[in-house]
Image (cartoon, rainbow, N blue to C red):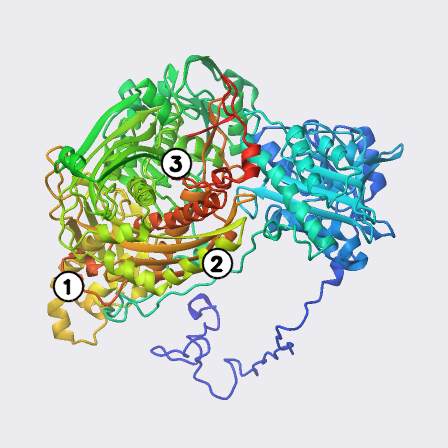
Amino acid sequence: MAKANGGSGCCQEKNGTNDTNGGGCGKNGDTNGSNGHDQPIKRFTPPGFIEYNPDTQLIFPSALRKHEFRPLAFGNKRKRWFRPVTLQQLLEIKSVYPSAKIIGGSTETQIEVKFKAMQYSVSVYVGDIAELRGYTFTDDHLEVGGNVTLTDLEDLTDRAVEHYGPERGQVFAAIHKQIKYFAGRQIRNVGTPAGNLATASPISDLNPVLVASNGVLVAKSAEKTVEIKMSEFFQGYRITALPPDAIIAAIRIPVLKAKGEYMRAYKQAKRKDDDIAIVNAALRVRLDDSNVVENCSLVYGGMAPITIAAKKAMAYLQGTTFTDPKTLEGVMNALELDFDLRFGVPGGMATYRKSLALGFFYRFYHEVRSALNPEDAEVDRDAMAEIEREISKGYKDHTVGAAYEKKIIGKEQPHVAAMKQCTGEAQYTDDIPLQRNELYGCLVLSTKAHAKILSVDASPALETVLGVVDYVDHRDLPSPEANWWRAPNCDETFFALDEVFSAGQPIGMVLATSAKIAEAGARAVRVAYEELPAIFTIEEAIVAESYFDHYRYIHDGDVEKAFAEADHVFEGVARMGGQEHFYLETNACVAIPKPEDGEMEIWSSTQNPSETQAYVSQVTGVAANKIVSKVKRLGGGFGGKETRSIQLAAICATAANKVKRPVRCMLNRDEDILTSGQRHPFLARWKVAVNKDGKLQALDTDVFNNGGWCQDLSGAVVDRALSHIDGCYKWKAVHVRGRVCKTNTVSNTAFRGFGGPQGMFIAETYMEEVADRLGMPVEKLREINFYKTDEPTHFRQELKDWYVPLMYKQVLEESDYDRRKKEAEEFNKKSKWKKRGLSIIPTKFGISFTALFLNQAGALVHIYHDGSILVAHGGTEMGQGLHTKMTMICAEALNVPLETVFISETATNTVANGSSTAASASSDLNGYAIWNACTQLNERLAPYREKMGPDATMKDIAHAAYFDRVNLSANGFYKTPDVGYVWGPNTGQMYFYFTQGVAAAEVEVDTLTGDWTCRRADVKMDVGRSINPAIDYGQIEGAFVQGLGLFTLEESLWHRASGQIFTKGPGAYKIPGFRDIPQEFNVSLLKDVNWENLRTIQRSRGVGEPPLFMGSCVFFAIRDALKAARKEWGVEEVLSLRSPATVERIRISCADPIIRRAHVVSQEGEKSFFISI
């Protein structure tokens, strides 16, 4: 205690005089080891820790080993939970509650509860019952406990193969193969075979194996134990023979004979790993010594509402001589009868699914023939092997910035938030701490694609759902006009009025005390509709002449003359689908009303804080200066949060304004996909004039995109497509026209590339097809038509610092393209079913907003007393590394260490009137604005630097300047010079510059299934003098893989009967997985050239969007492989391949006898189950 308070004095007072002290803790003036009372100090003796050795196996805590599990029961009248710890306890509970939901891993139950709103009054967790997790090896079967996890089963099957031997253990090898690609490791760690069986999924990967092996389920109830044959277990869609009061206690899996019995399992999905099957199969045959079939099982999933045996094929196969070639043909004929799918079959893909059923047996037949006689000349060995791949590897040039790097700029630096993001410390919108009296919102969305709203009744939610506080809709806005939004065309409403134009259109919002209660309340709101005709596809819109008013064209040169004088005129159609953004963080918002003057703070996951501010101001009826829109960071945006995030923010603000309480809402993945829009699907009808030497003459094209039910940014997207439709190629004359189709899908919006990839895809499509018709290698056609430096584009902009031809040559050489192309051709000659293809694709991407006014940015830089610097700018951080580059620019400009510069957030009260973070221009715009602010500060601080010398720190300089009353804050501004294109007259400069690149890819395709792998990809980008090569490499790799997904995997499907999007979550919509990454992935940046005309910050180029189109080289490599596949069967007509090149489209594009016999023709009036938009 201090002496002033009657104590002996604190550490600083002891042994000191009035003017001195004892030195503080650890600094006592005494050196004899005594304290103020001359007591000896008790020294702490450190314990004898065992030195850490990473090879030492950790000891499992003995207390946990001895833990005794005890049964638990808790709950109330509405919901009860039980946790039995013995099988007998479980059976007793089940006898009392036959309808109780058995919970193992809860992988299926959580989906049912979350997305299907299913409720279970009684749930029983069985994960702690040891009797259900055992296994027993017997002479003729392996008995596995029903609650063994799939991960343990995966290991157990390996042991079973070792125990029984490879011949008798084939069934376990089949199970292991299916589990290997079943879901993800986290799911396999908790999922169980009993749960998998009980859900009775028709596409379960385990079910066919267990049925084909004649497995037996041991079902137990309190009264009896029954054995159920797997072949009799599935009785209908999601219906089984399991008695209501019974549980699956064990599964008996028979082993095969040591000789003459063969079994294999197969699966094909949209994506190889972590995906549900389109079709799977388990095929087994037992032969006698003469190779006559004694017994067989041909069991398929994905071909019917249940796991089903091909009975006609099995009947035919029984008793035949397996090695007789007629057997194969007979079984194939019988399979056609077993699986005579109609065109509109539920689940769609009739032709593809039928071809897989036939293809799997074809592969199985030849595998068995090969096992019987490896020297059998009639064995089709190429059909036997499935595509496997290596772990990805690659090369990057980390010395690329050495020639121009400065103190900070040009060097590789880690992302400033990388560690926070990896450890989970990074704060996103929904991580903002809960506010006092906060409510949760849940949107009430339309369920019809096009309908009149007859009535909306929120009373069931308000009156019957405990915890629901209020309901908000258009009546809670300050005026009817406040409901309308979107620039440049104000044609969208925040809340639907008397008509809905798309499934997923917001009608209202329910407010409640928890997110779960709000969801329940939203489901309780009753909406009555009168359905109206709906339009979904571009083709339907063209027939109905359903367009928005937006119409643009680019006309350059005498098109008619060029067509008249050309040697050849070719026509075709290019078609590509959309793409879901699938950012990790869905749209989220927290609206916090303030107690005075109508002020409100909006935390939103948005790329566009300023427009968010403007529309929140509109819906709350107060001026924009009372609204502060803030963003800490986004968990990905890709354009999907440029405009569509405003809808949620405005609705939350309306709700918060009504109840005068904070309102939070984070959309789940389904809601986000339903409301946020996608990349625009495109259709182009092109006509090309070309001479016989391959020189392009004229291009005439009509371009259509699917805008959805309102315009959003669709007009600007089609405009950019028109400006990129030339690709990298010089034309004598061009006339291209663009229209936006009005349909009844979700309003499509910005997506990384913003129409550029669609325009360039059209370009590379006609280049491929023209080359095929000319009989010329497409690589040569591209090369002879490249623009040359200073040549004008079709919108009359000269190309400066033009390095595409150079990079094209470098990629050809560095990837050894020509040699590998020849090797692929030789491979294709020898391989019937596996085909390889290569492609090399260039890109030029214009950098600038096409809307002139958006090409501006502001920044605010503060220098504090301690020398630390706070930067604010108009751009948002969404993982792309913008803040990292901006701090580097500031640190370089002010000549301070990078760690002294900090960016806290993006907010409209620090930088006003900012443009959205988009168009790959944010580094250019905000970087120069920051540089401008720093230049002002440097001018003010120059006298102090001169006075204090070069070694003076910013802390010293700032301190001195502050006491001289120098302003240590600066507001910077930048606007892009020169740009300003005029549509129609075709005058003015459209883009400030072009980011360029070239990519090459090699693929291998299994034409029997449509499966494929990218063997190698080489990407080279010209990003100028990179501000941070590490960030740019990350952007290039990420964009390439996202482009790969766009052009090969990601297909959006609508359910025709309901008009709703079907692919609205990770279960149905597949983005690239680990196995889709190129096996060899080499990325490099252009170096050793001069960028004389590049007037950007550091002479760098924008890099966010341009590399995305590079992923199309995988698509065109697949097309190249398909050309070889079709040639194998005598088909050499030009292939028009639609994007994305899904496994279904790849397989159907082949021309082999199996796909021909599997072809399903639609009957008159019959339509497909799904609509591919």
Closer-to-camera residue (1015/872): 1015
Q: Nearer the N terminus, badge 2 or badge 1?
A: 1
Say which residue label 2 marks: 1079
Q: Tag 3: residue type?
A: Gly
Say which residue label 1 marks: 938
Q: Quadrant of residue 40?
A: bottom right
Q: Residue at x 53, y 23 (%)?
A: 523
Question: Which image quarter holds the C terminus?
Answer: top left
- The crowding category of the residue bearing disc 2, from other C-alpha atoms within 10 Å (few below 14, some 14 to 19, many at least 20), is many
Q: Tell me residue 680's x, y (percent).
A: 35, 34
- The crowding category of the residue bearing disc 1, from other C-alpha atoms within 10 Å (few below 14, some 14 to 19, many at least 20), is some
Say which residue label 3 marks: 578
- The crowding category of the residue bearing disc 3, from other C-alpha atoms within 10 Å (few below 14, some 14 to 19, many at least 20), is many
Q: Secondary structure at mark 2?
A: loop
Count all numbered tags in the image, as a single digit. 3
Q: Tell me residue 929's x, y (percent).
A: 19, 53
Q: Quadrant of residue 1093?
A: bottom left
Q: How far is the residue under mark 2 from the one under mark 1?
A: 49 Å
Q: Secondary structure at mark 1?
A: helix
Q: Nearer the viewer, mark 2 or mark 3?
A: 2
